[in-house]
Structures are given as structure tokens and as C-alpha cells.
């Protein structure tokens, strides 16, 4: 199980297919995160969710998939721990609860909802401070709006451009938060 280990919740599109640039980057991301001994968590379905889980499993890592009973369908084959939420709101709440950090890949309205929820929970202090990493420049407009609206609370949200940058940023954030390095 993953108790006592860092969990990185990753949000992203269900649309990319094997071989697409977004899919390949997501797979590399899962490989990098699991390579540090951290657990990958996501929505458990296709696209970047499959890619991240596939990369994590290739590295020998653990994956958590939180699916939704309303959507139907099984989780992708790379999920090692499956949870099924009763509805979308319960699914979102569980994905937030499980994460010690969040990485937001490019995506559509569902990913935007996830990003907005994380930022709002952090701003309202409905959860403890946690790292939020935006992969690439895709979400820059949302970040600009959040920074303008939130008097600097979104400043903890960072843009990163590679899987290696994600791992470095998380390691630094957790080391600063705890005053020591933790796996």
C-alpha cells in the first residue's frame, strides 16, 4: 500500500492516444514520479491518466485510480489500487484528499474544474498548503486570473516544463515544508 509515501495527484485530458506527444510526456511523468518512490494518483481512465499510470507501473510504482460510478467502465489496466466514487463531486473530493501535491497537465473543461477546485480549496484554506504544478504554458491564462483574484495565494502554483522539473519542484517544496528531505 501507499501509506507513509507521498501521493501525487495528476489531472489531465482523457483524449491523447498512445504515441501522441501529450501521451508520451505523461508516461515520462509517471516514470519520473514513481522513480522517486512516490505514488501516482489520477482519475483512472484513458488518455493521460493511462499514460501516467503506465509510466509509473513501468518504474515499479504504485498507482491509484479514482473512477466514477456514473461514468461506468473499468479503470485502465495500469491502476494498482482502484476506488470508485459515487458521483463526480465525490471523485473530485477523493482526488484532492489523496494528493500531497497536484500536477495539472493540459486538458479540457474537466481538468479546468479540477485545477479551479484545487486553487479554491487552497485559497480558502480548506486544505493544508500543497504544491500545485502546471505542466507547460497551457494553463497560464487561468494562473494569471487566479493571481489577480487571490492576492498572491496562487503564487505557490508553479509552471514546469518537463517531468524532471516536476520531480525537482516537488522535492524542493516538500523539503522546504518539512525542513528535511522525505521520500
Image: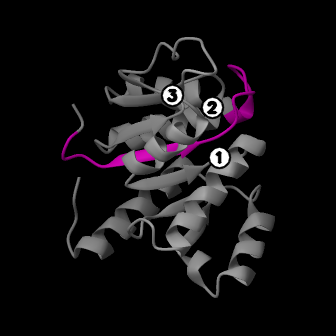
How many C-alpha atoms fall within 10 Å of the one at disc 2: few (<14), some, or many (≥20)?
A: many
User: Could you tell me if the residues under marks 2 and 1 are in contact, i.e. CB atoms within 8 Å?
Assistant: yes
Is residue 6 part of the magenta span, yes or no? yes
Residue 66 in picture, x, y percent from top left: 47, 30
Chain-order first, disc 3 or disc 2: 2
Residue 161 in picture, x, y percent from top left: 63, 56
Q: How is the image coloured?
A: one colour
Chain-order first, disc 1 or disc 3: 3
Q: In the rendered structure, which segment of residues is drawn in magenta?
A: 3-22
Disc 3 to disc 2, how far (Cα)? 22 Å
Residue 149 in picture, x, y percent from top left: 72, 81
User: In the rendering, which numbered label is found on residue 44?
Assistant: none
Q: Nearer the viewer, mark 1 or mark 3?
A: 3
Residue 15 in picture, x, y percent from top left: 75, 27
Is residue 62 part of the magenta span, yes or no? no
User: Left or right: 138 with respect to 94?
Assistant: right
- Residue designated by label 2: 48
Q: Give the structural element (helix, strand or loop) at label 1.
A: loop
- From the viewer's perspective, is residue 13 above or below residue 123? above
Q: Nearer the viewer, mark 3 or mark 2?
A: 3
Disc 1 to disc 3, how far (Cα)? 25 Å
- From the viewer's perspective, is residue 3 above or below residue 70? below
Residue drawn 65% across and 46% down? Answer: 105
Residue at the outermost right position? 141
User: In the rendering, which numbered label is found on residue 105?
Assistant: 1
How many C-alpha atoms fall within 10 Å of the one at disc 1: few (<14), some, or many (≥20)?
A: many
User: In the rendering, which numbered label is found on residue 86?
Assistant: 3
Residue drawn 65% across and 40% down? Answer: 12
- From the viewer's perspective, is residue 66 above or below residue 80? below
Amino acid at each position: 500500500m501507499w501509506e507513509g509515501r507521498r501521493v501525487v495527484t495528476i489531472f489531465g485530458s482523457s483524449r491523447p492516444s498512445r504515441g501522441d506527444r501529450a501521451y508520451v510526456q505523461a508516461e515520462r511523468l509517471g516514470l519520473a514520479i514513481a522513480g522517486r518512490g512516490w505514488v501516482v494518483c489520477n482519475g483512472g481512465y484513458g488518455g493521460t491518466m493511462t499514460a501516467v499510470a503506465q509510466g509509473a507501473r513501468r518504474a515499479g510504482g504504485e498507482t491509484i485510480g479514482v473512477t466514477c460510478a456514473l461514468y461506468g467502465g473499468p479503470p485502465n489496466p495500469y491502476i494498482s489500487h482502484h476506488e470508485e466514487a459515487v458521483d463526480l463531486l465525490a471523485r473530485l473530493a477523493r482526488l484532492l484528499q489523496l494528493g500531497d501535491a497536484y500536477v495539472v497537465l493540459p486538458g479540457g473543461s474537466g481538468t479546468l474544474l479540477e485545477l479551479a477546485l484545487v486553487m479554491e480549496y487552497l485559497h480558502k484554506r480548506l486544505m493544508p498548503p500543497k504544491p500545485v504544478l502546471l505542466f507547460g504554458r497551457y494553463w497560464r491564462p487561468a494562473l494569471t486570473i487566479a493571481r489577480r483574484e487571490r492576492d498572491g495565494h496562487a503564487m505557490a502554483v508553479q509552471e514546469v516544463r518537463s517531468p524532471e522539473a516536476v520531480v525537482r519542484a516537488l522535492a524542493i517544496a516538500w523539503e522546504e515544508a518539512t525542513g528535511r528531505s522525505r521520500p
